[in-house]
Amino acid sequence: MSAVIDLCFFRHNFSIAKRASLSSLLSFSELSCSESEDGKEACLFDFMDKNSVTEKELIFKIRELRQIKPREDWVSLTKSQILGQEPVAEIRFLHFPFLRFPLFKPVYAGLIVVFVVFGAFGFTESSLPGDLLYPVKKIVERSQAVFVSEKGRPQASFELANKRLEELTKIAETNQVKKIAPALEEYQASVAQVTKNLAKVTATTSDPVVIRELAERTQELEKNKEKLEQTYGIAGLEIKEGSNPMKVLVEWLINDLEKRTLTEEQSLLFETAKKNYEAGEFNKSLEKLLTF
């Protein structure tokens, strides 16, 4: 076996040997001019005569070749080819050189995951509730939410809720009746997330500007919902008890106004807004409270 590997190594590194001042040595093709052992021996002696190389000198030069160390991956690949074995894992780099690129090292694994996540979004964006790829779309959305700051989560949740309404609109336009029920569930879940995020904001902020911005987004969501109900007559869009984002905002605004000094006219309007709140008419109450 050692002799076979040496012979293969001689072929593989012969060009290196010539550059290492071994130019007088015969090329391997000349030494292999005959298939028979006698023919090869005759070629060898002919070479020695032409180049005035003694047998001792030839042996010395061949031994010099043995000092050149082959690459480990080349040795493993050669062994596997001779023995008919499967190449070891490291040899696969020979066939796939791009795997040596730094991005394929474990340290870059996180970066690769990011590209995969955002790339997968393009393939699943058009899927609807009830479709095979929709669960993948939800996974991608949750993965993207990881990169959203705490401050930006309320706005991001509003975008997702409006996206659920857009999905319902597409389902209604194409009359995909079987998908309406799962789409309604997705919408209700998204509104519940909006309310959860708003509750966190109202519990930590005292800035009315922030609340007003969120109130405007809530009103926009409500208008989109009403438009869908009126256009396609979809039932089940009513917000469940305890998940109404308007209720959270109205409560914050009422508490804030109770600490202020109001004019007589403002006080009357404020009392009307509170009555709307007590009656569960959160949309009317919010409209009045935003005039202050």
Image: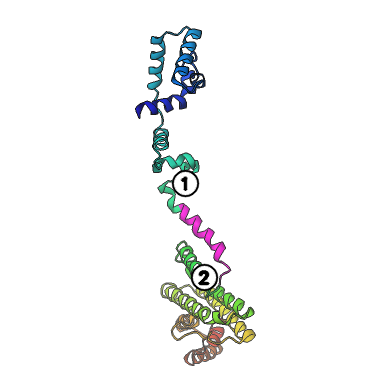
Q: Give the vertical position of 200 relative to 177 (above or below).
A: above
* Circle 1 SS class: helix
Magenta segment: 111-127
- Say which mark, if any, is on residue 103: 1
Q: Quadrant of the N terminus?
A: top left
Disc 1 to disc 2, how far (Cα)? 32 Å
- Say which mark, if any, is on residue 132: 2
Amino acid type, callout 1: Leu
Whether residue 21 can be seen here: no
Circle 1 crowding by C-alpha within 10 Å: few under 14, some 14–19, many from 20: few
Count the marks: how many? 2
**Would residue 13 be counted in the magenta stretch?**
no
Label 1 with label 2: CB-CB less than 8 Å:
no
Whether residue 231 can be seen here: yes
Residue at 37 percent of width and 26 percent of height: 3
Most distant residue in the left direction? 2
Residue at 56 percent of width and 75 percent of height: 162
Amino acid type, callout 2: Leu
Q: Quadrant of the C terminus?
A: bottom right
Give the quarter of the image for residue 10: top left
In front here: 107 or 249? Answer: 107
How far from the left and from the top, in percent, is residue 80?
40, 38
* Disc number lying in front (1 or 2): 2
